[in-house]
Each structure stands twice: as C-alpha cells, then as structure tokens.
C-alpha cells in the first residue's frame, strides 16, 4: 500500500547536536511538507517543497533545514540553532491542488 | 489572508451523545474544505471533504456540509463512541492557489463511557 513513512518514531538527542528526521513517500506526490506540533497547539508549517530540488520556508523555518533531491524523500534537519526543538514533527504530501494531505505517523523528538 | 476558526476544546461528551464541532472560514476564492482526525500519537487522517458549496462530506457516521452563505463547515455525528476520542482539524485549500492548506487549531474530543 502507498503511504508516507517517518522514522524513527521516537528520537532523543543532546542539546547542541544536529538531528535529521526521515520522510519517505511512495505515492508519487509532487508536494511535501514538514509541520511541527506542540501540545495543545495546531500545526505550524516549517518547510514545503512543490517539486524536486526546490523548497520554500514556512512560518517557522528558523533553526531547520531541508533537502529535496528525490521526489520520494524530504528529510528535515533540526539544527543546534533551533532554540526549542522538543516537539512532534509531522511530514505530509499531496499530489495536486485541492487534494487532501497524506500524513506520516510523526516523529517525537526530545532534546535534553 | 485565509483563515480557519474552530471552536475551542476540549469537547467532553458521554457515549451516544450528539456531536457538533463548529468550523468557519475566510477565503479570498472558492476553497475546498476538509476535516482531519488525529488519534493520540499518530498523524492526521482525512475524515471527509467537500469541494463546492452545498456539498456534504460523510464518513464513519460523521457529516459536514459546505455552507457558502455562512462560510461554515461544521462537523456532526449523531451518536459518538469512546473510540471517536481524538483531535479534529478543519482545513481549507484554494483552487488555483499554492499547495499550502490552511488549518484550524484543532478541537479535542473526549468521549466518556
């Protein structure tokens, strides 16, 4: 079955370390997204990509970086510059305008 | 800009009660409207959608009607179950626009036996 896979489900890092979250999709979707979700808060857009080798900043891009070298993959790096990185991170994709997003099951990152 | 406003939660109900979660929107064009559901520890899943005025989306006993005159897309279910406990997100996308959907802040539903 097609879908989006995020790995790992739980990730622990020490402060000051960069960490990369994986997102892979086999839906042949052009557009991919990264969202951050904090307890009791909605979704905040970090980065999005509408096509391979191109991506744009979302509302809270500071301290994060992404790449889109392949259509299937959109990894997110949380850098040491991100002041409060502990959160639940969601990856999503969609194939065309007005179609719903497909979400992965998230990665919960804890930085201590 | 475009926006989606949902009623604040948590909404707490007893099993078999009637559910309404309000959602209103503002948009510059003619949006498609969605409800997503998020169970604890998981990602969001599409629950239902409507792409034009007066359309009714339905799935798993949930319904929502696209009301252009009131710019609303309220989610309803006639008889909730404990397993419906989750966070519900209303969202819109605009035709001909970017691929970026606009989400509401989510409404938590807690159903007690």
Image: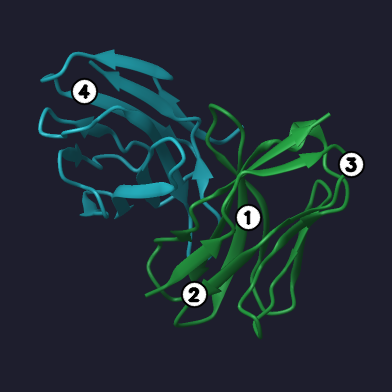
Spatial CA span between label 1 and label 2 = 17 Å
Q: Colour of chain B?
A: green
> Residue under mark 4: which chain is it in?
A
Question: Does mark 1 fall on the same chain as mark 4?
Answer: no
Which callout, 3 or 2, points to the residue nearer the camera? 3
Mark identifier at residue B95: 2
Spatial CA span between label 1 and label 3 = 21 Å
Q: How many marks?
A: 4
Q: Mark 3 points at which residue?
A: B16
Q: Are marks 1 and 2 in contact (CB under 8 Å)?
A: no
Q: Mark 4 points at which residue?
A: A19
Mark identifier at residue B35: 1
Q: In which quarter of the image is residue A81?
A: top left
Q: Where residue B97 sits: x, y (%)?
A: 40, 73
> Residue under mark 2: which chain is it in?
B
Spatial CA span between label 2 and label 4 = 36 Å
């Amino acid at each position: 079955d097609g879908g989006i896979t995020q790995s790992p489900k739980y990730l622990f890092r020490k402060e000051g370390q960069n960490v990369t979250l994986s997102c892979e999709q086999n839906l042949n979707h052009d557009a991919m997204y990264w969202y951050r979700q904090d307890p009791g808060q909605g979704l905040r857009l970090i980065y999005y990509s509408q096509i391979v080798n191109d991506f744009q900043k979302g509302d809270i891009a500071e301290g994060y970086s992404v790449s889109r070298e392949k259509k299937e993959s959109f990894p997110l790096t949380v850098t040491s510059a991100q002041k409060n990185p502990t959160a639940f991170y969601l990856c999503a994709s969609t194939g065309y305008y007005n179609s719903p997003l497909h979400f992965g099951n998230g990665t919960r990152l804890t930085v201590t | 800009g475009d926006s989606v406003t949902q009623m604040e939660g948590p909404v707490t109900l007893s099993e078999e009660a009637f559910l309404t979660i309000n959602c209103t929107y503002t948009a510059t064009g003619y949006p498609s409207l969605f409800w997503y559901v998020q169970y604890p520890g998981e990602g969001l899943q599409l629950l239902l959608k409507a792409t034009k005025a007066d359309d009714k989306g339905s799935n798993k006993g949930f319904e929502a009607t696209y009301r252009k005159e009131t710019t609303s897309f309220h989610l309803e279910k006639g008889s909730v179950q404990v397993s419906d406990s989750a966070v519900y997100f209303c969202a819109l996308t605009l035709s001909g626009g970017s691929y970026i959907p606009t989400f509401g802040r989510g409404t938590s539903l807690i159903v007690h036996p």
